[in-house]
Image (tube, helix red, strand yellow):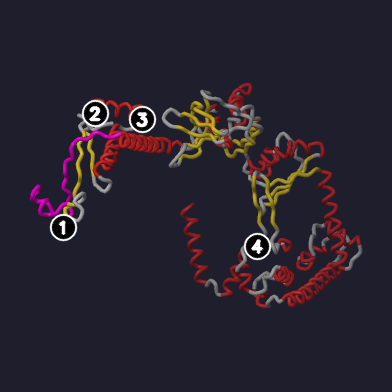
Amino acid sequence: MAVSANRLELLQIADAVAREKVIDREIVLAAMADAIQKAARSRYGTESNIRADINPKTGEIRLQRLLEVVDKAEDYSTQIPLELARDRNPDAALGDFIADPLPPMDFGRIAAQSAKQVIVQKVREAERDRQFDEFKDRVGEIVNGTVKRVEYGNVIVDLGRGEGIIRRDEMIPRENVRYGDRVRAYVYDVRREQRGPQIFLSRTHPQFMVKLFTMEVPEIYDGIIQVKSVARDPGSRAKIAVISNDSSIDPVGACVGMRGSRVQAVVGELQGEKIDIIPWSQDPATFVVNALQPAEVAKVVLDEDAERIEVVVPDEQLSLAIGRRGQNVRLASQLTGWDIDIMTEAEESERRQKEFNERTNLFMDSLDVDEMVGQVLASEGFAAVEELAYVDLDEIASIDGFDEDTAQEIQTRAREYLEKLEAEMDEKRKALGVEDELRQIDGMTAQMMVALGEDGIKTIEDFAGCAADDLVGWTERKNGETKKFEGLFSKFDVSRVEAEQMIVQARLAAGWITEEDLAKGTEEEVTEAEQEA
């Protein structure tokens, strides 16, 4: 490129690039001006402050060297003395700039190549900015495009006014696409990147299926039917939970469509992925039973604190409930947000018998009673000696075959057993070096202190540094499967709230916090709750 090049041709090039890249003409002209400035610096010196301007109407190029007005010039390529500056402009002052016109110049081969690189880079940056601005508000939408190329399993998609990428792990397994194929995908992220695509697409995202149903089912689009949750094993199977805001409309039937037309349209787009449409329920037990379809459920037992549910199914339904490689129960767990344990009726009966025998033996050993009395107590629902020691006496006396004297004797033996156990644990606690100060904490027992001592927690400060997870355990959920980690107090039937209260007491006793800190924290929690409400 040369400064003396045909002015009309320069404007024509700018117009052509602007149309091709869908960017403003002014941005292209500014990129050309930057390129000319860079080439001019290589001619007049890189330290020179050179400015190039292109007239957007005529294409005329004007080169100027800007000289800073100083008292005494040290570098005449960038500075001009105040005295000389005022010869050109009587109003010149220190810190101003004087524009020194430069003659037109022809670029050499290297300078022209450098200018071309600058133009390409500036246009590319402008194009990326335009793509980001155009697509940043389209996250959560479905877009259509054409496969531009496939690189190491990643699919580059031409979206018309942008370029997106479907990474290998965002493609449905065993799905093959080639250059020129039309594809539909979900925009899950748009972010500024220095290199490569910045529009990220997915065909495995759960919301991709939701958006497809929204397009196929007018009732979802109109808000009459809501999609509450989705779980997918892309390309294989999926579950979607729906609810109708209109009691006269069946949400499952509406999503299936006449002769399955609506759901089959979605299945076709998802490469034959089988879809179970589940009626959502506010009741967790009902929702889990629905989610395990097509398996039949005999009984469910909920543990709301641990968000875990135990499902009992007929023996012949076990494989159906679990699914191939655990797929059915895994998807049901993802859909409902509950950890699901599945067992057969035979397994449940065996487990209940085992628990019954364990409780019977516990009462026989701790209360020194015969097997029949132990079985009666276990069958009445008593699970621990502590329950017998502190329950209302009438509750024991009301058992068939028991009278008040018998109840009193059982309760007395239960308390004596606990006192003996407490004394034994206290001796063990002392041997471990656990401080007496921990006894100040409400709910703390000698058995708990032994558990702490065995884990190296011996002082009030040690205990104050614990978290609730350390005491009651925690769960980690990954890929629909949950792993449970035991805490120091897991076997003592201590709730998370109780554990947190015990830790707060320890921190107060250790001087880590004050009552004022607690009051302030409570006020902030109340304020946040009111704002959310």
**Viewer can see residue 361:** yes
The first of marks 4 and 3 along the sequence is 3
Q: Which is more N-terminal, label 3 or label 2?
A: 2
Q: Earlier in the sequence, mark 4 or mark 2?
A: 2
| C-alpha separation, residue under disc 4 versus residue under disc 2 | 76 Å
| Disc on the earlier residue, 1 or 2 | 2
Looking at numbered disc 4 in the image, what kind of residue is underneath it? Asp
Q: Position of residue 434 (x, y in %)?
A: 70, 75
Range shown magenta: 80-108
List x then y, in percent, for residue 49. 24, 46
Q: Relative to residue 317, is residue 9 drawn left or right?
A: left
Which residue is nearer to you in this view: 23 or 316?
23
Left or right of residue 511, residue 346 in this image: right
Q: Nearer the viewer, mark 4 or mark 1?
A: 1
Q: Secondary structure at mark 4?
A: helix
- Amino acid type, callout 2: Ala
| Structural distance between the alpha carbons of marks 1 and 2 | 39 Å
- What residue does disc 4 label? 470
Circles 2, 3 touching at the beta carbon (< 8 Å): no
Q: Which residue is mark 1?
A: 72
The residue carrying mark 2 is 5
| Residue placed under numbered mark 3 in the picture | 22
Q: Nearer the viewer, mark 4 or mark 3?
A: 3
Q: Residue at x 75, y 77 (%)?
A: 431
Looking at the rendered image, the disc whose residue lies closer to the viewer, 4 or 2, is 2
Q: Residues within 10 Å of mark 1 (few under 14, many from 20)?
A: few
- In the picture provided, is 122 more to the left or to the right than 250? left
Query: The N terminus lies in which quarter of the figure?
Result: top left
Inspect the image, locate mark 3, and give the three-letter code of the amino acid beneath it. Val
3D distance between C-alphas at marks 4 and 3: 58 Å
Residue 498 quadrant = bottom right
Q: How many marks?
A: 4
